[in-house]
């Protein structure tokens, strides 16, 4: 309302020790444009989060462990830095303080980049540039819904250019402009399950446990949500 | 469609983009449709008339201005030929108020004018024209343009190639088309070159593509039909996708019916199975009587109520699924002799998930299976013993004694009896409600110990092997059972006071401090207020036994051998008993409050929440485990319940470090008895022989000496 978003979606919930964060995202007309993220502790008051920068991500990657639930909580991280003082070079321990808000921002950003997915055909790209919601998207068929290749990462393509020309010839430039899930490393980091007979397909990410994507085949309904602790599963290669 | 402009107005100026021009031309065509149908003054009423016409047009081949330069004539010609019936109604009021739109592209303007001119002519419905067209229609396709075989509207822009085609036509001038053509006959001789162009264009369009039987013409017909039927809001921007969809549909109409059948089946099968759930067991009068008896004591808990409370807490499965689980558990209760059962939770797997039910059998029901298992293991041990004995016999015969390895496998810790410790409950799993329940085997301490060292996802198939290091003794069913045991031991909690120890005296000392292992419900329990439950962890207690590092709940000294083992290994035992002394392992006793739980790296092991802070009198206290993410417990008044929904792994803030391989075993210590002696060389043997002969013959010293010399020479 205040921010002039085209759509506002509930992104998920990050469980903290003391309190949980409820996250929502606002989308503008161009679906692939960076989204504004809002968080709230009680679903009634929402605050805008700053967009994620590289620096934030790098900083927050050193913080491990659960979220506290208090946005102003600061993590302390000691780093060894070389300090030059005159002729001496010695290492000093510097305590870097990282705010939980920063960490929240970077985690949301990482999750979005890594595992936010969209079924193929739900968005299409016009030659003018902006990506639009495909009004005629009627859902994936059942056989398509079980394949990983019918789902795309909801972000700018990274691997698309690495495909061979042969593969590119099969793609449809208006629909296939994002990376598909097929080539995700590590292989098998997505779990596809059909529920209720074949009426619902659920994809769960094993890399970020808690990310769930659902789609009812042959309908327009799909969506993803993250409910979890906000931590990446670093042991995935051992667990597969 | 709302965006069709009223008749007297023109669509607004648009940039000379291919699509916009096409759109405007499409609108243009609709405009043309409208005046045909309605009076000019009624141009506002677009919808009904256009819709009426649209199907009609589509059946016959709707106008497609995308092929702006060629098609207008062709289409109209064909329409006139085929759909002459509709035109009489449009005869009269064809106001020629077609103001030419100031397109920047002159060719398109000309095409538009061509359109209008043709429309006018056709309206007259002169048969002569038709005949002319008929005669020229069977002309073979004129334009062998391969690019146009692609069904892409993108390619339509290359229709500019055909620009000169039209431009050359003298009839295509701006002015004459604007004028009304009341008398068709006067125009007959003039438009002949026009007609030729039309026919050429049309023939080209009807040309079928190489890959299928679809011609461009028909495709565009379909496309426009679809657009007019569906009336999407922004047709221009969805044009591309519509194009693609139409193509797809055309290519796959028949396959759809074939595909439907196999696709339906999985859903159908599942529905069949679940239908069985919904029907009651037994039938008729008997069924009813049984029901009456059972109503008093059903072992199946009220899952729906539990699900409701958990939903308050923000945890749980959908009500759909909960209900099916309830029915499935009821089925389980009917199939197996169950004393109590409980829905334990859901463990997610990669391909399928597991629904777990915790069950306690009635007395004396399950012993039969266990005996079989024990016999098997005993048989195995006997075999091993036999092998060892044989080895010993062989050893006595040979001179060289094969050194026996010093390493002995660590003693097998016996698993706990059923109904006690980690095996207190039996667990049944199924993948989805409606599928048959499978019983999980009891867990052995070795499995628990191993399960602590590995971290693997469940695939969903019980017989899948668990590939890991250290190698897990068992398949996925065992691993699942081990994880269930660990989770139960760690996270099954209840409010303080709900359970109390049964009155026993003096047992503690006898059991060696192992603690009590039984509890019973406290009949005097009055619920703890929810706020208190949330505030302090001391109000919650574990009601399952903690699993010791050994893998059991009650400690067993591994050095105490059973009778069979004593017979075999007497000689070795004495040597080993000395250095190994195992300390007794002690765990926290039963019913310890949660506040005593160890912290995980400065994190509290449990998190409490109130389900709703706005109405505390009705809210539910929820406790969430941080050690096992996915374990929840709720309590409200006198009710409480535990559940686990998750992947089945423990939380560790550190990364998982797989166990390192065991250190390399030491080689057998080298001693004189196994030292390899190098065989004497030939020279040495001969020297020895020579020396012996030398010693024998005293008189033949000279010869020996010669022989020695010879031997030495040969040696050299």
Image: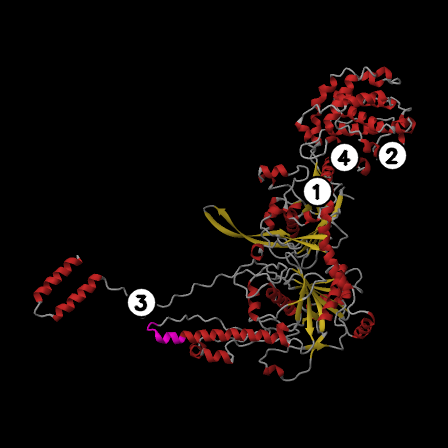
Q: Secondary structure at mark 2?
A: helix
In magenta segment, residue B209 = no
Disc 3 versus disc 2: nearer the observer: 2
Q: Which residue was labeled with disc 3?
A: B675
State whether residue B84 is above or below residue A198. above
Q: CA distance from mark 4 to mark 3?
A: 91 Å
Vertical side of B290 occupied by B271: above or below = above
The residue indicated by pointer 2 is B52
Q: Identify the residue at image location x=90%, y=32%.
A: B45
Crowdedness of circle 2 by 10 Å Cα count: few (<14), some, many (20+)?
Answer: few
| Residue B578 picture location, percent across and down | 44, 77
Chain of the residue displaying label 3:
B
Q: Does residue A222 appear to the left or right of A102 in the view shown?
A: right
Magenta-highlighted stretch: main secondary structure? helix
Q: CA distance from mark 4 to mark 2?
A: 17 Å
Q: Quadrant of residue A236?
A: bottom right
- Tell me the crowding category of disc 4: few under 14, some 14 to 19, or many 20 or more residues within 10 angstroms, Cα based: many
Read off the magenta span: B392-400
Residue indicated by mark 1? A121
Tell us which disc is closer to us: 4 or 3: 4
Residue displayed at 55% across by 73% down: B376
Which quadrant of the structure image shows residue B238?
Answer: top right
- Of circles 1 and 4, which is in front? 4
Residues at marks 3 and 2 on the same chain = yes
The number of callouts visible is 4
The colour scheme used here is: secondary structure
On the question of residue B697 being in view, the answer is yes
Q: Nearer the viewer, residue B216 or A11?
A: B216
Query: Where residue B480 appears, x then y in whole percent?
Result: 62, 64
Question: Of all residues shown, which one is farthest toward the bottom?
Answer: B506
């Amino acid at each position: 309302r205040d921010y002039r978003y085209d759509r506002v979606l509930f992104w998920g919930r990050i469980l903290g020790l003391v309190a949980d964060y409820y996250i929502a995202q606002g989308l503008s007309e161009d679906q692939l444009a960076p989204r504004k993220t809002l968080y709230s502790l009680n679903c009634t008051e929402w605050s805008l989060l700053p967009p994620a920068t590289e620096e934030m991500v790098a900083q927050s990657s050193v913080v491990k462990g659960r979220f506290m639930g208090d946005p102003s909580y600061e993590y302390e991280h000691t780093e060894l830095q070389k300090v030059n003082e005159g002729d001496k070079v010695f290492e000093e321990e510097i305590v870097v303080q990282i705010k939980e808000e920063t960490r929240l921002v970077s985690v949301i950003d990482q999750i979005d980049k890594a595992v936010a997915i969209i079924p193929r055909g739900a968005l299409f790209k016009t030659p003018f540039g902006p990506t639009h919601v495909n009004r005629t998207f009627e859902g994936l068929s059942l056989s398509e819904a079980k394949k990983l290749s019918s789902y795309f990462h909801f972000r700018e393509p990274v691997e698309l250019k690495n495909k061979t020309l042969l593969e590119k010839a099969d793609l449809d430039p208006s629909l296939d402009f994002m990376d598909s899930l097929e080539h995700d490393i590590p292989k098998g980091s997505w779990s596809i399950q059909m529920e209720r007979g074949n009426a619902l397909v659920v994809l769960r990410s094993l890399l970020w446990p808690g990310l769930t994507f659902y789609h009812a085949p042959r309908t327009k309904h799909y969506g993803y949500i993250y409910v979890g602790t906000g931590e990446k599963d670093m042991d995935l290669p051992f667990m597969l | 469609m709302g965006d069709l402009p009223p008749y007297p107005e023109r669509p607004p100026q648009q940039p000379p983009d291919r699509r916009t021009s096409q759109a405007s031309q499409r609108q243009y065509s609709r405009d043309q449709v409208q005046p045909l149908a309605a009076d000019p003054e009624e141009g506002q009423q677009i919808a009904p008339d256009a819709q009426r016409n649209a199907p009609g047009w589509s059946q016959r081949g709707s106008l497609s201005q995308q092929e702006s330069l060629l098609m207008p004539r062709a289409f109209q010609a064909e329409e006139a030929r085929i759909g002459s019936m509709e035109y009489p109604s449009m005869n009269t009021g064809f106001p020629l108020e077609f103001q030419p739109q100031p397109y920047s592209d002159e060719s398109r303007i000309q095409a538009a004018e061509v359109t209008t001119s043709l429309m006018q002519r056709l309206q007259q419905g002169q048969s002569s024209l038709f005949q002319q067209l008929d005669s020229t229609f069977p002309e073979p396709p004129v334009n062998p343009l391969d690019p146009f075989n692609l069904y892409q509207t993108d390619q339509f822009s290359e229709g500019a190639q055909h620009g000169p085609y039209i431009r050359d036509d003298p009839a295509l001038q701006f002015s004459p088309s604007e004028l009304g053509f009341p008398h068709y006959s006067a125009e007959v001789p003039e438009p002949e070159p026009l007609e030729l162009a039309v026919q050429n264009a049309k023939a080209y369009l009807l040309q079928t593509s190489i890959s299928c039987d679809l011609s461009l013409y028909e495709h565009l017909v379909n496309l426009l039909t679809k657009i007019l039927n569906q009336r999407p809001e922004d047709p221009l921007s969805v044009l591309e996708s519509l194009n693609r969809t139409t193509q797809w549909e055309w290519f796959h109409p028949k396959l759809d019916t074939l595909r439907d059948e196999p696709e339906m089946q999985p859903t159908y099968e599942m529905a069949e199975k679940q239908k069985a759930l919904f029907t009651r067991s037994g039938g008729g009068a008997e069924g009813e009587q049984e029901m009456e008896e059972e109503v008093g004591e059903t072992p199946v808990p009220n899952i729906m109520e539990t699900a409701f409370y958990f939903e308050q807490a923000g945890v749980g499965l959908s009500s759909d699924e909960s209900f099916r689980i309830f029915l499935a558990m009821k089925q389980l209760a009917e199939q197996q002799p169950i004393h109590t059962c409980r829905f334990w939770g859901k463990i997610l797997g990669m391909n399928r998930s597991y629904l777990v039910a915790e069950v306690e059998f009635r007395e004396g029901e399950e012993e039969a299976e266990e005996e079989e298992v024990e016999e098997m293991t005993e048989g195995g041990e006997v075999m091993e013993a036999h092998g060892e004995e044989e080895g010993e016999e062989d050893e006595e015969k040979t001179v060289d004694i094969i050194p026996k390895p010093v390493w002995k496998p660590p003693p097998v810790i016996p698993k706990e009896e059923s109904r006690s410790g980690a095996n207190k409950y039996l667990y049944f799993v199924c993948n989805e409600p409606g599928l048959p329940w499978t019983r999980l085997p009891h867990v052995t301490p070795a499995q628990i110990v191993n399960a602590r060292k590995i971290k693997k996802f469940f695939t969903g198939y019980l017989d899948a092997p668990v590939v890991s290091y250290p190698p897990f003794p068992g398949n996925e069913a065992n691993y699942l059972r081990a994880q269930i045991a660990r989770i139960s031991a760690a996270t099954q909690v209840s409010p303080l006071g709900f359970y109390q120890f049964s009155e026993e005296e003096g047992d503690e000392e006898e059991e060696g401090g192992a603690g009590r292992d039984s509890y019973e419900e406290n009949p005097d329990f009055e619920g703890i207020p929810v706020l208190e439950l949330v505030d302090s962890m001391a109000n919650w207690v574990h009601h399952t036994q903690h699993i010791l590092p050994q893998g059991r709940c009650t400690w067993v000294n591994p050095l105490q051998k059973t009778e069979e083992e004593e017979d075999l290994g007497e000689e070795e035992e004495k040597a080993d008993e000395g250095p190994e002394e195992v300390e007794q392992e002690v765990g926290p006793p039963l019913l310890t409050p949660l506040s005593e739980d160890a912290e995980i790296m400065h994190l509290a092991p449990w998190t409490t929440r109130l389900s709703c802070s706005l109405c505390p009198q009705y809210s539910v206290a929820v406790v969430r485990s941080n050690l096992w993410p996915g374990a929840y417990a709720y309590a409200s008044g006198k009710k409480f319940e535990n559940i686990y929904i998750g992947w089945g792994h423990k939380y560790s803030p550190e990364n998982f470090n797989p166990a390192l391989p065991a250190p390399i075993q030491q080689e057998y210590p080298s001693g004189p008895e196994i030292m390899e002696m190098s065989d004497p060389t030939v020279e040495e043997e001969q020297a020895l022989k020579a020396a012996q002969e030398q010693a024998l013959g005293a008189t033949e010293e000279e010869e020996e000496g010669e022989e020695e010399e010879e031997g030495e020479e040969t040696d050299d």
